[in-house]
Image (cartoon, coloured by chain):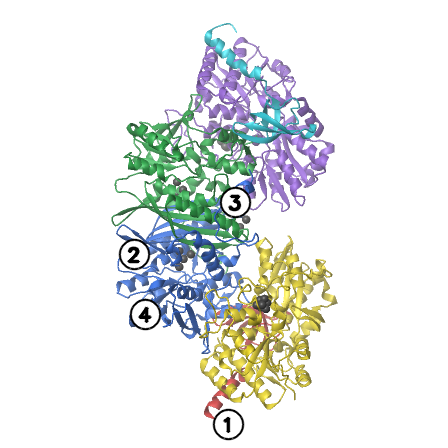
Chain colours: A cyan, B red, C yellow, D purple, E blue, F green
Amino acid sequence: MCLAIPGKIEDILNALPMERTGTVSFGGIRKEINLAFVPEADPGDYVIVHAGFAISKINATEARRIFDLLACDETDAPC
Amino acid sequence: MCLAIPGKIEDILNALPMERTGTVSFGGIRKEINLAFVPEADPGDYVIVHAGFAISKINATEARRIFDLLACDETDAPC
Amino acid sequence: MKYMHEYRQAVTIRQLADKIAAVTRQHWTIMEVCGGQTHAIVKYGLQQFLPAQIELVHGPGCPVCVTSIDIIDKAIDIAARPNVIFCSFGDMLRVPGSEKDLQSVKALGGDIRIVYSPMDALTLAQHHPDKEVVFLAIGFETTAPANAMAAYQARKKGINNFSLLTSQFLVPPAIEAMCQSPQSRIQGFLAAGHVCAITGYESYPKLAEKYGVPIVVTGFEPLDILQGIFLCIQQLEQGRSEVENQYSRVVRQQGNLPAQQMINEVFECQSQSWRGIGHIEQSGLKLSEAFRPFDAEQKFGLRDKVSSANNKYDTAGCISGDIMQGLKKPCDCIHFGKQCRPESPIGAPMVSSEGACAAYYRYATFNESDTFNKNAAFNKSDTFNKSTTSEKTTTRRDQ
Amino acid sequence: MKYMHEYRQAVTIRQLADKIAAVTRQHWTIMEVCGGQTHAIVKYGLQQFLPAQIELVHGPGCPVCVTSIDIIDKAIDIAARPNVIFCSFGDMLRVPGSEKDLQSVKALGGDIRIVYSPMDALTLAQHHPDKEVVFLAIGFETTAPANAMAAYQARKKGINNFSLLTSQFLVPPAIEAMCQSPQSRIQGFLAAGHVCAITGYESYPKLAEKYGVPIVVTGFEPLDILQGIFLCIQQLEQGRSEVENQYSRVVRQQGNLPAQQMINEVFECQSQSWRGIGHIEQSGLKLSEAFRPFDAEQKFGLRDKVSSANNKYDTAGCISGDIMQGLKKPCDCIHFGKQCRPESPIGAPMVSSEGACAAYYRYATFNESDTFNKNAAFNKSDTFNKSTTSEKTTTRRDQ
Amino acid sequence: MTKEQIDINPTCPLPFSDNERILLGHGSGGQLSHQLLTELIYPYFDNPMLATGHDSALLSIGEQRLAFTTDSFVVSPLFFPGGDIGKLAVYGTVNDLAMSGAKALYLSCSLILEEGFPMNTLSKVLASMSQAAKETGIQLVTGDTKVVEKGKGDGVYINTAGIGVVPHDVYIAPQHIQQGDVIILSGDIGRHGMAVMAMREGLEFDNPLNSDCAALSDPIHTLLNEGIAIHCLRDLTRGGLATALVELAETAEKTFIVEETAIPVSEAVTGACEMLGLDPCYVANEGRFIAFIPAAQAETALTLLRDHSVSATSCIIGRVDEDNKSQVIYKTTTGSERLMQRLPGEQLPRIC
Amino acid sequence: MTKEQIDINPTCPLPFSDNERILLGHGSGGQLSHQLLTELIYPYFDNPMLATGHDSALLSIGEQRLAFTTDSFVVSPLFFPGGDIGKLAVYGTVNDLAMSGAKALYLSCSLILEEGFPMNTLSKVLASMSQAAKETGIQLVTGDTKVVEKGKGDGVYINTAGIGVVPHDVYIAPQHIQQGDVIILSGDIGRHGMAVMAMREGLEFDNPLNSDCAALSDPIHTLLNEGIAIHCLRDLTRGGLATALVELAETAEKTFIVEETAIPVSEAVTGACEMLGLDPCYVANEGRFIAFIPAAQAETALTLLRDHSVSATSCIIGRVDEDNKSQVIYKTTTGSERLMQRLPGEQLPRIC
Ligand code: SF4
Ligand code: SF4
Ligand SMILES: [Mg+2]
Ligand SMILES: [Mg+2]
Ligand SMILES: [Mg+2]
Ligand SMILES: [Mg+2]
Ligand SMILES: [Mg+2]
Ligand SMILES: [Mg+2]
Ligand SMILES: [Mg+2]
Ligand SMILES: [Mg+2]
Ligand SMILES: [Mg+2]
Ligand SMILES: [Mg+2]
């Protein structure tokens, strides 16, 4: 359930809190997405989008962790 | 106006006075026709039909008159 | 088919043509009142059998032609409603209203059905109790009994989802109105045989006498029409103005009494507007009080609605009114065969194949001077101009 | 695409697979709760990277699969009405109701539109004030805020021709119900990352503790799922039953507070019927009192309508309920790949590509013993039987 | 990106006003169809073959002379007395090939199905196509199937295209019509159109009125085999006999003289036409043709044609006159003359 | 005479229940389309040429080898970024001919117009067809126009059929696929389907996503002229790459091995597919093909193909394996393997 994909906020189209929307780009496409549930996300941020709504802002640091972990394993260095 | 064509009554389908209908044949086709306005017309009689209604019974004697007249003219006999 | 094809044979046609030629000495202008007769005259090229002195002009007897724009607009209004099945005779679908025609309403999704008889519309109403079924009840006296019967049975059987949008015309008041017109050139009438099958012809003698015009009740086959013309010319040449019945195989003097009774039960007379011509007193039929619940105008709240006077068709120079009063011919119209063609009519007479304009267009007479150019647009030196331009007599026959 | 393709690379997948193999010593049965995860597991052939001892079973987290026949029948009832525009997410159109599906209503003329977002349905309602626009609001906690926002804005803007037919599910009560079932074989859960993005995972520790099951909040990319499995197996092998968050780039412990607030404003909890599984207390969301005017069941008088118990699908031997509770696998169903195929589904899990049956059918694993015969009907000695038939352990992990 | 933003910048030969729209009459085969073709479609495809207005195109590929034709079939109801859309779709293309003197060899078939169309009905249509193909010896070799949403079709539309071989000594085309040719009509007219319309209008018949729907290849090939120098052929379809005559007179730039009394019309068609106020010369046929033949061979041709049941009542209805006025003079039953016109739009039943 | 009374008595190979009906999926080009063809349509037309499942039929007429094909085009919207229904209708048939190695010569065009369709739009469609025909050197030689009532069409449906000549030494067909052949894909996939769907869904693009709609004849003829022994070609249309591969594997009775990582997909198509939950391998194309070529000629073929803009990003996506299991093994980006399937019905956007 809950097909949701990452996209990058490009601009804010409507800044009213309950109607907040913005252009989000997904690879080569852009679409107007409802941002009312991610008031903390600004242009440049990545969000996860489901059914036309951003449901979460992606944390870039957390996103790197698994790769760091696997790189560690590889070198057998203590991470 | 008032496209109406001659047809021959073949049978009576409904004999109730205000709902009288019968099969009328027109050349090679037959159709159920309202006969309420020609109570005097019976199977075998020709009627003139307009918009699904027989509006008049054809008088066979009168129908011959023009041909008799023209035949008379032809022979120059007094008719 | 019996009582049909024997009246279309070249031999007898020729015989009658000779008789007509033999009696004709002067120029005479005769109107065939009925569009069905116009259609037959043009389809069978009957003008070719007449001496040049006989000019036929074409009357207002085509219900498709004379139904007012107001009614067409109301029909369009009703037919476009979602819960309606709108029923009509075929030709009415192409008649232009002030903005569009019923056909284009159908093209936009309106449920419009072509029926052969008013009773077919009533049957539809019985089969679709969840829909409003409306029948566009046009016609002259010939059709009025059929329309009346549909209303009568609807009331009797309680079929309350059925109604009539009526546009019904009476012939004698129209004949009288034309006779009274100072411009009129008509010297004799061929009365409409099928109308008289219903009405009889007892009201005609006083017209014939008052206006000094012979009136011949005439049938619809080529031989009928030529005989009607013969009888009419014979009277004119002999200085008579009487009523004769050419169509005696169908028409009785008193008409069809049960049909008259049905008309009287369901309808009452009213002043009526004729498209292109105007109002004529007591020349129409409307539903009487008891049948008012079956009146579509009342049911759909359109009784007082009047179309915008400004419409794209009647202001476009269509001379249909003049044509139907015998004042002009289709080829006198600047649009005829150019913008106005059966595939794109401007006025109603170009729609119905009984309309004078459509009949002239469709059954163009062969003529050495090439009646039609290749694009089927008429050129000026047109066959049909021949008779009208020959002698613009306005002489009324006086006796 | 960033945050997507880097989680699908063969090299890192292989690394994690090795880590999993290294820690696995026993047979373990793990359920991925979410259909999106099932889809990814089968699409990317992730089972091929796991040791034979790890058995994945597929949870009820596909709203297309668990929406009750009753709701489908109500959707069909509403969608077939003349004045309605019925809006739905794409996959719902093929889900069988007791007699037919929405797609066949569309084939018979129902105005059914596929939308991407509940807000698109609301926009349609604004553009068609003369129509009733109904949105089939299915979903788990992930979709509930979007559905709620549509109702909230409709009320705020007075868009009264808009309503929701709701079928909304909550995950934690379902996990608890499965844990309580005596037949359950599930020893650990991969919790649905996108649900937790909304709800957070503060309610999970007491479940993990009470039922002795590790719960790993897991994402949807192949690398996420393998890491989730790794963390779960690691706990199981170490005898722990804790809550871990694999999907920390998206999921916060407390979830999305504005979204939770919107859910609370618009919806309230109710007992909910899960297709193939049955009622689970407090496992659903319905519109709260203030939003009742936007409830399609109420608007169309369907609140008390119950489908006939006797329907051609659920009595046909479909074992979707058992599959979604981890008791059986699609290939245990006698219809799988025979009468039941994506182009002619018998049960809902064959409809949505997230449904376990459809995912298994569509992304059949290549296997030397010829997984599919030519007609794409599965034969008995099927790849997928491998794991289920290997060892029918019912051991619940106890600690 | 919205529809409006796409700039396709066509080179449009005719500017239309925004509210000029396709009407049903544009598909009637009459005057409106003619305008659509000559004013809009032909100018875009500057190909002399199109303008010949022939039933099929004549192609030369290597040493071979081929005929190539296409038609889409959109009849409602799909089944009618004497035929169905499947038969029509096969015969229609076989006939267009035969009208070039070609032997029909290969057929394509493309179906546009409406969502919700019953499988059983489709099966019946296909069975009928299959039988018609066997009967006429044409092979269906390639096809296509599309499905459109409910409300965007009418059950099934069928397109067929056909390829045939034209013998080396056969030259049949409007341009080969000669002064003095007789015009042969292969049978009574109006059956197809009236059978379909009568079904809609609920008319009953003494003896069922069947559509004339039939393959016309056999009589044509008999004529060719027996050495009749056919100048032109035309199968009578939409628009009827009148429209076919007018089109050929214009393409050939000849004057035809046609006798109303010579044109056979069955009692049933006459009755139905009179009742509905239609002219049989404008009613559609699906198994009739006209042939232009040197007068000297007329009697032989008639004898040969009458040997085939499909053309058993063939007769001479007119001739090609001396002057070249691109017109059809119609001598009516009363003895008068008028010009024949194309069908203007569609024929609507005339009641009043 | 009512509909029910007509007895057409067909010999129906498959009895259907009364409520089995055509679904949109029957036109998707996938599994339902396949069933409709093999279970209903083919049995009625017992012609080996149909069952070859080739893009066009190969005919021998005298000394000539001809290819013959047809397709109907029912796309909505009629105009989309990168193309329109007119272009599609010409290219589609030219491409099917090219897939037999034929040079496209002659085209038929049959229009089914919906009552009320604007003349100006028709004019634009015709202009586009005209330009596409000029560009590909095919001549439109015969046509037909029908008009259906409002609500029984969708603006315009276009059928084209085409005839081409196949050189004597060219044998391109699924049956000629050989073990060891490489499978070349002519460019990135999914553009047409996503361009059309994105327009419906109102997606915006960084750089406009254009349909791949294009004529494929030039690169094919280059390959043939340069002596590449093409074993089989298939243009990718409805059903996408996956369906084409599965169909060919079944017809050829071969096993194909295809690498996901080798298949080019643009960023825009990827983004749109991920958003809507679609798989680009099942999305429609209108200007892409796959070619089966002996491994020894693969590099030469790639070089030749890359010289044409329409196939500039051609690449090898797989090969024909030793065993003959009529299946397509798909190596995914993660390193796992699974079997490719046909598209089941239509691809519906997956949301939840
Ligand atoms: S030709 Fe047309 S515009 Fe002129 S009078 Fe007749 S109907 Fe009116
Ligand atoms: S295969 Fe079909 S019938 Fe069997 S469990 Fe899955 S959905 Fe139900
Ligand atoms: Mg033809
Ligand atoms: Mg043709
Ligand atoms: Mg044809
Ligand atoms: Mg095709
Ligand atoms: Mg329809
Ligand atoms: Mg192809
Ligand atoms: Mg093709
Ligand atoms: Mg194709
Ligand atoms: Mg044609
Ligand atoms: Mg439409």
Type of amino acid under label 1: Pro
Type of amino acid under label 3: Glu
Residue D225, percent from left and from top: 52, 19
Task: Note whether residue A10 is visible.
Answer: yes
Task: Note whether residue D275 is visible.
Answer: no
Label 4 and label 1: CA atoms lie apart by 48 Å
Of all chains, the one bearing label 2 is: E
Q: Given this view, does label 4 or label 2 mark the residue nearer the observer? A: 2
Estimate how packed mark 1 is, as few (under 14), some (14 to 19) or many (20 or more) residues with alpha carbons within 10 Å: few
**Mark 4: secondary structure:** helix
Please give the residue where the numbered disc 2 appears in the rendered image. E166
**Mark 1: secondary structure:** loop
Please give the residue where the numbered disc 3 appears in the rendered image. E149
Task: Say which quadrant the N terminus of chain E sits in.
Answer: top right
Q: Given this view, does label 2 or label 3 mark the residue nearer the observer? A: 2
**Mark 3: secondary structure:** loop
Closer to us: D182 or D111: D111
Type of amino acid under label 4: Leu
Q: Residue at x 35, y 36 (%)?
A: F219
Q: Which mark is residue E302?
A: 4
Residue A55, percent from left and from top: 62, 25
Q: Are marks 4 and 3 on the same chain?
A: yes
Point out the residue furthest to the front here: C380
Estimate how packed mark 4 is, as few (under 14), some (14 to 19) or many (20 or more) residues with alpha carbons within 10 Å: many
Of all chains, the one bearing label 1 is: B
Q: Given this view, does label 2 or label 1 mark the residue nearer the observer? A: 2
Label 4 and label 3: CA atoms lie apart by 50 Å
Label 4 and label 2: CA atoms lie apart by 23 Å
Along the horizontal axis of the image, is B28 left or right of F256?
A: right
Q: Is mark 4 within 8 Å of ligand 3?
A: no
Please give the residue where the numbered disc 1 appears in the rendered image. B78
Label 2 and label 3: CA atoms lie apart by 41 Å
